[in-house]
Each structure stands twice: as structure tokens, then as C-alpha cells.
Amino acid sequence: MAGVELKNVEKSFGAVTAVKGLDITFEEGSFTTLLGPSGCGKTTILRMVAGLEAPTAGDILVGGTRINDVPIHKRNLGLVFQNYALFPHRTIGQNIAFGLKYRGVSGSDAAAKVKAALDIVRLPGVEDRYPAQLSGGQQQRIALARAIVIEPDVLLLDEPLSALDANLREEMRVELKAIQHRIGVTSIFVTHDQSEALAMSDKIIVMSAGKVQQVGAPEEVYNSPANEFVANFLGASNILDVRVAGSDRDAIGLEVPHFGVISVPRARAAGLGDAKSGRLVIRAEKLKLLPAGDAGAGVLAQGVVRAVDYQGQIARYFVQVGDMELQIMNMIDGRPFSAGDATTVAIDPRDCSVLPADG
């Protein structure tokens, strides 16, 4: 096992710069997710660590050793891809043992390692089957077993769950994280799925246009976004223009359209500095939708439900408050609100974050 460092790494494809001056550390034994939209550079980073692409500039280190010039077959990395990449005409045992063969491991030693890998992914006794005889989720576990059987220094996972259906994907992300925790290997996971990143990661690196936008634990990145891109990409956020109406040692008073003045704790408005205006960020699930005229807790405004996106236990409401539309996601207690219902919207200032006016 080893940590991974990228020092001032860049990657260009002709005139296009895909990755720009990255300085990132993936701590030893951690599960770190590169999260961002298509084209942001996350898969390019993974491919450079793997040795499938060479960086245009900068250094890549594994366990403190520079590996820029080390060929892929000598990097001792485990790779798991979205499409499994299993050999259809080889047995499961032969698929898993493929990497061992090139490391000089054969015979009873290889068989023992294959058996141990299958036990780790909870598929014992399938050595003699073929990939087509297994379900998609089982095939993904075999791909993982093939990656970990070589006892890699680093495990690289490129959207490995995206080909699975929704229920199986949720089951596999729990299983994958449990396996990573059990074997303790440094893991770099690439995804564009926010829920996967939040559920599985020790640390999330949010990327856009080849640059890092924010690095932090899932709770930090979600609850305290560094900028508007992060706020919008991770979950559903409402971002409102506000003006500073006053301050004291503990809080800053902000004038929010249609809500009046709310008092936000200073710790939640650190990015505002001495500016007189800013952008208030509040997650859709942090707003509360109440019946019209309800005197609930928080700072209140009156609105009208414009549309409802029913999601089973949760409903997402689009609510018109004056001249602005808010997204609100609440658990359904009894009958959900309907389009056209008059409502009260409540904000708890402790749930707000404040960004500079430029986002």
C-alpha cells in the first residue's frame, strides 16, 4: 500500500489542456473520489496514475517514488473499469489469475490467491464458471477480485458501478467500500455520480475544466461548498443574492429578498470577508415547506407551489416566492402539496452558507 501524490501535474492533448497544474495527495489507505462532470479531467488523472497517459508536465509519485517513466506493467496497480473487461472465453479463475501469471505466480500459489480474492468479494467456489454465467453485479465483483489479487499498491476505479441498475449500484457501493476498508488499499475512484461520492468517500476532490474546485470530507464539501460550481454540482441548491445589513461578533445580518433579514453565524459566512453583498447558498432539503400562514420556526416567506416532482418518500417542490423560484425537497408526511397550493417557506439561518458575490 502507498499514498499517491501529483505535483504540478498537467496534461495537454494538442491545443487542449485537460488537466491544469494539479497538486493533489491521496493519503495511504484512503478512499478518495474524483468527482465532476464529463470532460473535467478526472479520468485523465486516473489514466496518468495508471500509466495509460504520460503527463505533459509535473511528477506523479507512489509511496514517495516518482513513477512518470515506469511502464504500466511495473506499477503494481489494480484497475477496475466500467465495462468489467473480463475475458469471455476464460474461466473466472483464469480471469482472476491473469495478473499473477505475469508476476511469476503459478500453480498452487496462484490457486490459493484466487480463492482468497473470491472470498474477499464474497463469491467463493465460482472458479470454473465463465463470465456469461454470472450476473452483472457478480461480474463486477470478479473484476474487483482480479484487481486486488495482485496485492496492488493502489486501486484505481473508473466509474465501475455505472453499468449496473440503480438497486444493484446502491448495493455494490456499500460492498465496494467494505472491501476497500477490509484490505486497506489506497483507492482512487472516478465518478460523476454525487450520491456515490458522498456515500463512499473518505475525501472528495471536486473538479471542473481540469482544475480542482474543492477538496474535503463529504460532509464538508456538501455543507460548506467553496463556490457556486460545487454548490450546484453536489445536490440541489438555492443561491440567492443578499446584502449585508449588519454584523456582530457571532453573526452577520443578511437581507434576503422576500424573507427580510436573517442572522447567519460568522463561521457559515467566512467567505464573505468585508464585502457588502454576497450569495446565500441553502440546500433544497434544508428549506421547510409548511401550510400557508403556518408560524413555524425559522425565517418565513409566503409562496405558491408551481410544480411537484414526486419521488416516493420525498417530493421536490418548485415554489414561487415573489420573483424567485426555490427548489425544496421534503419528506412527505401525509398528503404532499400540490401545484397551486399556497405555502409558507421556512429558512433556518444555521443551514445557510455565504459566498462572495462573484461566486
Image: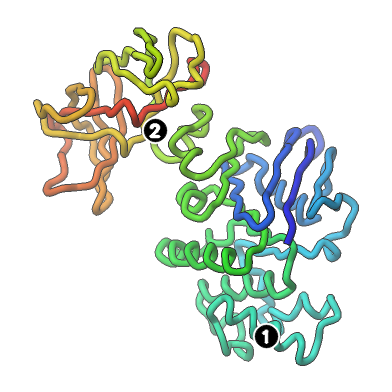
Label 1: how many Cα within 10 Å (few below 14, some 14–19, many 20+): many
Look at 83% across and 43% down and name the residue there. 59
Q: Secondary structure at mark 2?
A: strand
Quote the CA–CA distance across marks 1 and 2. Answer: 47 Å
- List the residue tagged with mark 1: 93
Look at 49% across and 37% down and name the residue there. 233
Q: Position of residue 37 (x, y in %)?
A: 56, 42
Q: Position of residue 79 (x, y in %)?
A: 70, 63
Q: Which residue is at the front of the view, 54 or 201?
A: 201
Look at 47% across and 53% down and name the residue there. 199
- List the residue tagged with mark 2: 237
Q: Position of residue 307 (x, y in %)?
A: 23, 36
Camera sees residue 52: no
Tag 1: residue type? Gly
Camera sees residue 102: yes
Image quarter hosting the N terminus: bottom right
Drawn side of residue 50 relative to residue 182, left or right: right
